[in-house]
Amino acid sequence: MNGPVIHDAWTLPVDDNINPYAFSVDLNGQWFLQKGKMVAYYGQIDFHGVGLGHLDHLIAYSFHSPLHAADWVVAEGQGKMVLADRAFDVNSYDLDDGNLSIRSGNLLAFQPSLSLKQSIVPGFLTLIGTGKFVAASNGPVVFMEPPIRVDPQALVGWADCPTPCHHYDHQYLRGFLGAIRSRTGIGGASGEEHQFEFVGAGTVLLQSTEQVVAEISVGETGGTGS
């Protein structure tokens, strides 16, 4: 009878998935890491808050999102880090002189060769440059080509294409209820009534559910309790 696979520092994969829900980072230097996403590590690794003195040069080059500075740390040293996020699917992606915007709750970690900026779309961050990043999704990611309209809750991000615009279904805007919604923004939350519209060249990343990977405070489990 076959038992579970037991890993150690030498058998963990190098910058690859351990299983669909956990990723092993081979650290030899520095990575940016969202707080609460490291579940274990081997080796000599220190974790520094964004803004620590000796990391000023690194922060100035790679981190340009003051709204999210408190949510991130720099992992520095040598070893293996295991990343995971509430049993969501976890994958790595490579940017080659690229530009990718991603929902802030989905981004787990990225190499300092990439530059992180705040997207003009609320709730999203933008990675620019060349390097690897790790992200979570609620179910497998589907890659789509514009022009396309997508449910905002299923949207993980978009790469190398223009920022989306809002599209509202005609029925959503008709009648008295539609007028109230158009003025107040109340109601009409389904993807059938409201979508993000992408045009031009590039790639759109969708998760296979309409449940957003929500941001949670560090130390919370995300459970409902008993």
Image: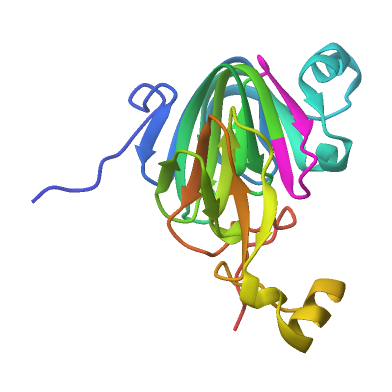
Which picture quadrant has residue 64? top right
Query: Residue at the bottom extreme?
Result: 176
Q: Locate residue 11 relative to residue 25 in the image: left or right.
A: left
> Residue 150's spot in the image, x, y percent?
54, 55
Q: Is residue 196 above or below residue 164?
A: below
Q: Residue furthest right?
A: 53
Q: Is residue 207 left or right of residue 113?
A: left
Q: What colouring method underlies this structural image?
A: rainbow
Q: State the image quarter where residue 144 is shown.
A: top left
Identify the residue shown where x is 57% and y is 67%. Answer: 191
Residue 149 shows up from this direction: yes
The location of residue 105, given as percent across then percent down, is 66, 49
**Front residue (pair 70, 182):** 182
The relative height of residue 21 versus residue 188 in the rendered view (above or below) is above
Quadrant where the C terminus sits is bottom right
Q: Is residue 39 left or right of residue 142?
A: right
What is the tally of numbered marks visible in this picture?
A: 0
Position of residue 215 relative to residue 157, above or below, is below
Q: Is residue 56 magenta?
A: no
Q: Front-most of 136 and 43?
A: 136
Measuring from the top left, give residue 4's x and y in whole percent.
24, 47
The residue located at (44%, 24%) in the rendering is 15
Residue 113: image x %, image y %? 66, 14
> Can residue 84 be seen?
no
The magenta region covers: 112-125
At 70% from the left and 55% from the top, the residue drawn is 166
Q: Is residue 121 magenta?
A: yes
Along the viewing direction, whichever of 225 and 181 lies nearer the viewer? 181
Q: Nearer the viewer, residue 197 or 34?
A: 197
Name which quarter of the figure residue 115 lies in.
top right
